Amino acid sequence: MSEPQPTLRHKLQALRRVAGYRPVYAVTILLCKLVAALFEGIGLVLLLPIIEFAMADGDAGGETSQIATYFIQAYELVGVPATLETLLLGLAAVITLRYTISFCIGWLQASLAVAYMADLRRRAYENLLAADIAYVDEQDGDEIVNTIVTEIRASARVIGEILGAVEKLLFAIVYTTVALVLSPVLTITSVLVLALVAVSTRYGLDTGYGIGDQLAKANEEIQSHVNAGTRGLREIKLFNMESTLNREFDRAHDRLVDTRVRLERNQMALSNFNQLLNAFVVFALVYLAIEYLALEFATLGTFLFAIYRLSPLVSRLNNTLYSIDGALPHLVRAQTLIGKLDDHADTAGTEPAPTPTTTVTADDVSFRYDDDAEGTDVTNVSLRVERGETIALVGPSGAGKSTIVSLLARLYDPDDGRIYANGVALDSIDLESWHERVTVVPQQPFLFNETLRYNVTIGDPDASDDAVERACNRSQVTAFLEELPEGLDTELGDDGVRLSGGQRQRIAIARALLADADVLILDEATSELDSPTEKAILEGIDAMDRDYATIVIGHWLSTVKDADRIYTVVDGRIVESGTHQELLAADTQYAELYGSQIAATAPSREGW
């Protein structure tokens, strides 16, 4: 369903933000355009004495118009005789200056447009990285990518189009002024008719904004299909979805092509119909000038040349305004994304995180997702972990365990209650400082399209080779390192596409162990590993010369049974806590689930 088009006020607000970009630079361009327009006017007016001199066989003493007299006096003022040759040389000099300035204008204008595009992209990307994760999780990732990559490129055209419209307007004013001096009656008639033609040709066409908005949505749809094709290629092949997705992509691309063709068609219609009608206007003016006004040949020739230059300019100005209207949806989307991300920036405190962090406490914490967001709300959660301890969160899938550790890592902020580090409220601590003290290994870690070494050292880029080797040994990365063609310098591909799930988890564990953190969160971090590998990694962590405050979400019961405390999470609430033995001895959900797992004849490593 199409969104309502913005009002003129909203469009002007969007354009005003563009106008505020590098105002000194933009004003310089506008001044150059003004100078170019003045030279255009001088060159145009110079035609009158040149024609008069040519008709008088170069006789400067013959009868001349007032305008020609001004030029003769100007030449005499600088000590140059006014002859046909010098007038032609003057015209050549004026034209040379005019087009040299136009070249500089084009250069400056292109530089400004590219700089504006780069600035929009940089601001959008910076705001994305600074945005609250809870907000970003609720957004359409394809829409964000499409806006930053595609919409911003299209919206950058606006700044060039605006400056182009101003240039055309300045030249139109110059041509109109010259024509007014030569024949006020014909000029007023011409301007009224040309304006009427420009306005009338806009009727019957779709609005530029409407088509531009459809084009932006079509681009977003294409982006979504391409992302699905690259990231979901295995599932697409396994479920034989190629034909279905090809048809959907073809339909989406057909909509994009149809919208683009309609936009181009409308722009061509504006241009060609305007020029056709303007030609009729010029013919009519010639007839009126000869039949009723009895203008001198030189005056008539100069006037018609001015109108000849003015009429297509009005057509191009009309087309430019239509192009601006068509580019506005892209600009509005880009500005809206930047603004919303900025409005939802992480609110960080200013205090440094306690070093070392020895205690993390959650006090009656609650968090609620928006209705359309994925995730389980948590309610009245209280827990505590100290350095040297290991606590575990267990429970069925979707119980809210990952949400709890996201709150402890301060990826999300609680709606109620507070979290403390060494008694200091987490929301008063500088976010970067806190993330230096806590490290998280998620179940599905993200790997950058970089080398293995880069992915291991993102938490400590200056880590020594010995430190990297120790982290790889403890995380069992070395078990598959020799299989990689370049070892640590092997490119892993997009999100580690060349690795298995277990290998990706081991790399994520290595990166966490290399970071100089006090709190270690393992969010089902070994779910893809076999028992011997998991046991070796956990023993490697225990053997480290530092004590973590460790929080484990257990995929397998063998992972959590040795924890100092186990918290059972159901429907976003902690329903019980204790050691493995304490929970087994009591009538608890943990004991019930543990008993059913032991009694099962399925593989011993059955998860929740």
Image (cartoon, rainbow, N blue to C red):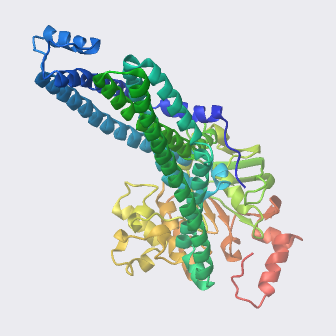
Find residue 141 and report its horizontal and vertical position in percent: 60, 58
In terms of image quadrants, where is residue 549?
bottom right
Residue 24 in the image, given as x and y percentages of width and height: 39, 25
207 left or right, relative to 419: left
In this picture, residue 423 sits left or right of residue 513: right
Check the image and report above or below for 603 versus 437: below
> Is 380 situated above or below 551?
above
As displayed, is residue 403 above or below residue 553? above
Q: How many marks?
A: 0
Image position, residue 434 (x, y; %): 57, 46
- The residue at the point 68 percent across, 82 percent down is 605
Q: Nearer the viewer, residue 52 or 506?
A: 52
Instruction: Report the quarter where the N terminus lies.
Output: bottom right
Q: Position of residue 461 (x, y in %)?
A: 39, 55
What residue is drawn where x is 58% and y is 42%? 202
Where does the C terminus fall, quadrant-wise? bottom right
Q: Name the residue: 56% across, 82% down.
A: 532
Q: Nearer the viewer, residue 517 or 194?
A: 194
Residue 582 at least partly seen: yes
Residue in the image at 18% along x and 13% along y = 72
Closest to the observer, 490 or 569: 490
> Would residue 530 be visible to someone looking at this image?
no
Which residue occupies the foreground of this view, 354 or 84?
Answer: 84
- Picture quadrant where residue 590 is located: bottom right
Seen as rendered, the residue at the extreme right is 587
Q: Residue furthest front?
A: 291
